[in-house]
Image (spheres, rainbow, N blue to C red):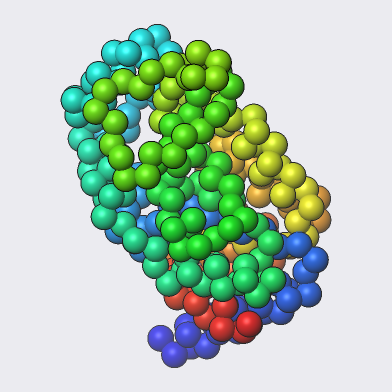
Amino acid sequence: MQAESHLQHREIAEAASIIASSRYVVAMTGAGMSVESGIPTFRGRDGLWTRYGQPKMDGFKRFNDDPAGWWERNLNRDIDAHIIELRDALVAAKPHAGHHALVQLEQAGALNHVITQNIDGLDSRAGLRNLIEIHGNRSRLRCLGCGERQSLGDFVPTEPPDPCQRCGGVIKFDTVMFGEPIPKDTMAAARAEIDQADCILAIGTSASVRPASGLLWIARSQGATLIEINPHETSLTSICDVVVRAEAGDALNRLASFW
């Protein structure tokens, strides 16, 4: 255990040195970041899909085929059990030490932007300012016509939302469904951040969910240094310059202590 701790300290110190000497640092966070806040992952031994079965991958098509029917089913909780469990976990979740460490790094000027694949809103609740939620945010609505977003806060809709006041388009939750393209404005903003980054922190992501994870390979192909923070090996591990085998909260807290 002492040898493992010493090795992690060396790797975190190396990561801190790389970050300090980098011009523009971007972090991408995945489900492993949220699990420490009590939000279950989808895959793995205790994942939602492992326990309940993988859902159908055509959610966006089914929404488009019958938006009113989808809203009626959703609001009446006539939905998959794994969605109900996830929703309850999201309501109870709070930012952990790792989220606050990212804020500390941002405030210190060591971290320029965060791209998160998570929909929980914990990053913004922790105080992150430069943030792209590439898969949307559970507490917002989005118009499929013009892309306008509306914050729900703690409000939970009890009836299907009216058409968009600006363009008359269909309204859905901001979270990206299976089969739904990432909104063009969001993807363009994420790609712009990746294009100017010379250092990427990949935190708690399996690097297997496309197209978001593809940004990591793009960054690598453009010469960015990759630092992985993850307790498990991933498909990204082999191309990373530094690998920290630790949970996000612990590793980021120790990383932030260098500033």
Q: Picture quarter containing residue 191?
A: top right
Identify the residue at image location x=40%, y=9%.
65
Identify the residue at image location x=23%, y=46%.
88
Residue 162 placement (x, y as % from top left)? 38, 18
Residue 92 placement (x, y as % from top left)? 26, 55
Identify the residue at image location x=37%, y=14%.
67
Q: Picture quarter containing residue 110?
A: bottom right
Left or right of 187 in this view: 92: left
Identify the residue at image location x=55%, y=67%.
102
Q: Is residue 50 visible?
A: no
Q: Residue furthest front?
A: 165
- For residue 48, above or below residue 184: below
- State the quadrant of the N terminus: bottom left
- For residue 145, above or below residue 92: above
Q: Pick whichever, 258 or 67, lies toward us.
A: 67
Q: Pick whichever, 35 or 23, lies toward us.
A: 23
- State the quadrant of the C terminus: bottom right
Q: Residue furthest top?
A: 65
Q: Picture quarter containing residue 84?
A: top left
- For residue 55, above or below residue 82: above
Left or right of 122 in this view: 144: right
Residue 98 placement (x, y as % from top left)? 46, 69
Left or right of 98 in this view: 184: right
Residue 97 placement (x, y as % from top left)? 43, 72
